[in-house]
């Protein structure tokens, strides 16, 4: 009987040891998976942040190109307006000069007729 009891207790200890070892392996595996999952989540987050940074950079670059184009167009428009104003002023000056010359000729003709 003692021998059977010893054998039974030994088997029970062996079974408990096997269960404990199994629990430890399961827990270790869970920890490994949790660590792997966390690592994957961190990698995904880094990837997302990098994509977000790139998108911001693209948007900033696009805004800068748009602003540069606006300035370019504004300068072109100003140049065209300045050119038109210059041309108008030259035409106005030429017109005034022609009117002055005409007045002088008329005045000369009046003087010539008067003599």
Image: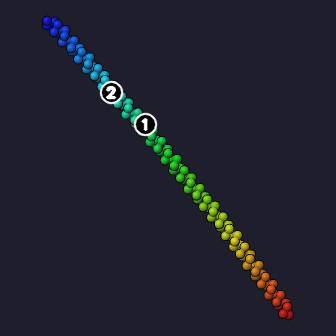
Q: Secondary structure at mark 2?
A: helix
Residue 14 percent coordinates (x, y): 23, 14
Residue beneath the point at 81% across and 84% down: 105
Q: Is residue 56 left or right of residue 88?
A: left
Q: How is the image coloured?
A: rainbow
Would you name the residue on which mark 1 appears?
44
Q: Residues within 10 Å of mark 1 (few under 14, many from 20)?
A: few
Q: Quadrant of residue 39?
A: top left
Q: Secondary structure at mark 1?
A: helix
Quadrant assignment for the C terminus: bottom right
Q: Quadrant of residue 88?
A: bottom right
Q: Is residue 18 left or right of residue 83?
A: left
Q: From the viewer's perspective, is residue 67 above or below residue 15?
A: below
Residue beneath the point at 36% across and 28% down: 33
Quadrant assignment for the N terminus: top left
Would you name the residue on which mark 2 appears?
30
Q: What is the spatial separation of the Cα atoms under label 1 and label 2, in whole angstroms?
A: 21 Å
Q: From the viewer's perspective, is residue 54 above or below residue 20?
A: below
Residue 104 percent coordinates (x, y): 78, 85
Q: Is residue 41 left or right of residue 19?
A: right
Q: Residues within 10 Å of mark 2 (few under 14, many from 20)?
A: few
Residues at discs 1 and 2 in contact (Cβ within 8 Å): no
* Marked residue nearer the N-terminal end (1 or 2): 2
Q: From the viewer's perspective, is residue 79 above or below residue 31?
A: below
Residue 77 percent coordinates (x, y): 63, 63
Residue beneath the point at 62% across and 64% down: 78
Q: From the viewer's perspective, is residue 70 above or below residue 45?
A: below
Residue 99 percent coordinates (x, y): 76, 80
Q: Is residue 50 left or right of residue 35?
A: right
Q: Quadrant of residue 91?
A: bottom right
């Amino acid at each position: 009987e003692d021998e059977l009891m010893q054998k039974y207790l030994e088997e029970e200890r062996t079974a408990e040891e096997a269960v404990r070892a199994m629990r430890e392996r399961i827990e270790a595996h869970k920890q490994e998976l949790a660590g792997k999952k966390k690592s994957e989540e961190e990698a995904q987050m880094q990837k997302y942040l990098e994509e977000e940074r790139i998108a911001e950079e693209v948007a900033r670059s696009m805004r800068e190109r748009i602003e540069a184009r606006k300035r370019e167009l504004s300068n072109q428009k100003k140049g065209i307006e300045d050119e038109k104003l210059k041309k108008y002023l030259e035409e106005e000056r030429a017109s005034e000069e022609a009117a002055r010359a005409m007045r002088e000729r008329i005045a000369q003709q009046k003087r010539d007729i008067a003599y």
